[in-house]
Image: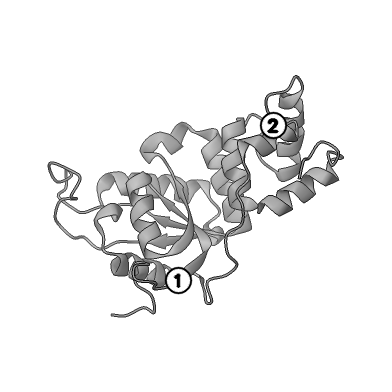
Amino acid sequence: AAHGAGPGEGGAVKRRIREVVVVEGRYDKNALKQAVEATVVETGGFGVFNDKERLALLRRLAEERGLILLTDSDGAGFVIRNFLKGAIPKERLKQAYIPDIYGKERRKSAPGKEGKLGVEGMPPEVLVQALERAGATFEDGGGAAAGTAITKGDLYELGFSGGPDSGVRRAALLKKLGLPERMTANALLEALNILYSREEFLEAAVGFGMENEARA
């Protein structure tokens, strides 16, 4: 069935999703990026169970944009799904399920334990259908074009990394943004690029009295 957009090849415009989509790993993320325009965050497989920073980021993203959970259809995928169902407010979480299709991903030498294809093995149109059934919010017109990303250089220029009091300044910023104060500079950078445009972040820095340190 046609869904108004293909996998982004041949000039076709991919549909943009407002919610943040949560997948297990980078190959899943790559597959989803072929199907739709979306912010995609990985759980790192079971790593999310003990990653307080990742969980705090997911909770913040759920609060701001809502999450759509898209894991593999095998037992491991459901363990991750059930963990996050208990960690994220249910009204901020939508569930997207891929069908049971048996086979082997091209990069793998053998099928998974249950013989089912994971998210990374799904055709783009199947992923779009799964998101539609989950109630994803498709934003027609593609939304605003992505701007310049916030970089490590920005954090350095603004005193959030690499300086004698960077830890203190970063903790104050994290508190203001509602993120855990122990979040590393790398984790902060990831969160900032999901939650804010570079322009919005620099404006927030001005509000922090750091305007004289920001360089154009």
132 vs 86, nearest the viewer: 132
Q: Are marks 1 and 2 in contact (CB under 8 Å)?
A: no
Relative to 172, say whether 121 is above or below. below
> In the image, which disc is placed on residue 177?
none
Q: Residues within 10 Å of mark 1 (few under 14, many from 20)?
A: many
204 vs 59, nearest the viewer: 204
Quarter assignment of residue 153: top right
Residue to which mark 2 is pinned:
156
* Mark before the other along the chain sequence, 1 or 2: 1
Residue 54 on image: x %, y % = 52, 39
Relative to 35, say whether 50 is above or below. above
Left or right, 49 with respect to 143, comes to: left
84 vs 19, nearest the viewer: 19
Residue found 28% across the figure and 80% down from its top:
1
Dot 1 falls on a residue whose secondary structure is loop
Residue to which mark 1 is pinned:
15
Residue 78 on image: x %, y % = 33, 49
Q: Residues within 10 Å of mark 2 (few under 14, many from 20)?
A: some
Q: Looking at the picture, which amino acid does disc 1 mark?
A: Arg
Quarter assignment of residue 98: bottom left
Residue found 71% across the figure and 25% down from its top:
167
Q: Looking at the picture, which amino acid does disc 2 mark?
A: Tyr
Residue found 36% across the figure and 78% down from its top:
3
Residue 170 on image: x %, y % = 72, 32
Residue 8 on image: x %, y % = 37, 67
User: Given this view, does label 1 or label 2 mark the residue nearer the observer?
Assistant: 2
